[in-house]
Amino acid sequence: EDGSVVGHAQLNSAHDLALAAVDPQVNDALLAHAEAAARRRNFDFLTVYAVAEDEPLWALAERSGFAHDRDVLRMWRPLDGDLPRPSWPDDVTLRSFDAADGEHVKALLDASYAGWDDAYAVRPYDDWLAFMTDHDEFDPALWFLVERNAELVACALHWKEHQRRGWVKDIVVADAERGRGLGKALLHHAFRVYADRGVERVGLKVDSSNPTGAPQLYEKVGFVIDQRLAVWIKRL
């Protein structure tokens, strides 16, 4: 409007839609435009994330046919005091990420998330790789891979530290390997690596409906919820 941006929308291959506008009518128009684009691309659903405090976005989702599906929990863990040492099973090895690992890591993530989340959209590999690595937050030394008999069985992908904060982007354990303490060991390992870099706290987001026990694990290792992000889904 008059040469100034008064609204924006971004639709990605994961079917996630982010939008904001000064005028609610612009928000409605942006959503209608994005939904039409999603239909042209044969998307079968759209996802919008909103906190209750963002009243315009919350109201937009409600009046536009989205259903409040679940919440995503944002959690933080301070890195103070004596940090626990990771305890690993004897038959696994830990190493950092190499460029040749990309497809294996994505396959493990896709298998884990798609196994319980029916709204999970599998990104094309090149799209996923660019999203995960083509920015300043990517540091391969902070992507930890666990292998048993040379097979990837778990991984934890972290963003590079910023303003003395770290972030757990993804952490998954193969179905057959759950219950062996790999997730807990990966977190404890990351805490110590981050602390050596001067990080004071680590954050993450976890789906409240995650059936793998991830929210309970994060609470056990010291994470505390500080925000609930609502997940709104519209089937197309």
Image: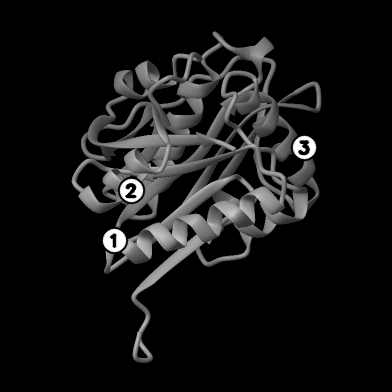
- Where's residue 29, x and y in %? 43, 62
Mark 1, residues whose alpha carbon is within 10 Å: few (<14), some, or many (≥20)? Answer: some
Camera-nearest label, 2 or 3: 2
Secondary element under disc 2, as helix, strand or loop, is: helix
Q: Quadrant of residue 49?
A: top left
Q: Which mark is residue 24?
A: 1
Q: Going by the image, does 68 lie left or right of 82?
A: right
Q: Sequence-wise, which precedes: disc 1 or disc 3?
A: 1
Q: Are marks 1 and 2 in contact (CB under 8 Å)?
A: yes
Residue sitting farthest toward the bottom: 3
Amino acid beneath label 2: Leu
Q: Is residue 199 above or below residue 178?
A: below
**Residue type marked 3:** His
Which residue is the site of mark 3? 104
Residue that appears at 53% across and 60% down: 33
Q: Position of residue 159 (x, y in %)?
A: 48, 52
**Residue 205 in the image, given as x and y percentages of width and height:** 39, 37
Mark 2 nearby-residue class (10 Å; few <14, some 14–19, many ≥20): some
Secondary structure type for disc 1: helix
Q: Which quadrant would residue 202 be assigned to in this image? A: top left
Task: State the separation of the CA atoms marked 2 and 3.
Answer: 39 Å
Q: Nearer the viewer, residue 174 or 226?
A: 226
Label 1, label 2: how many angstroms apart (C-alpha)? 8 Å
Position of the C terminus, as image quadrant, is top right
Q: Nearer the viewer, residue 159 or 19?
A: 19
User: Where's residue 161, x and y in %?
Assistant: 40, 56
Name the kind of residue labelled 1 in the image: Pro
Q: Which residue is mark 2?
A: 60
Looking at the image, tell me whether mark 2 or mark 3 is earlier in sequence order: 2
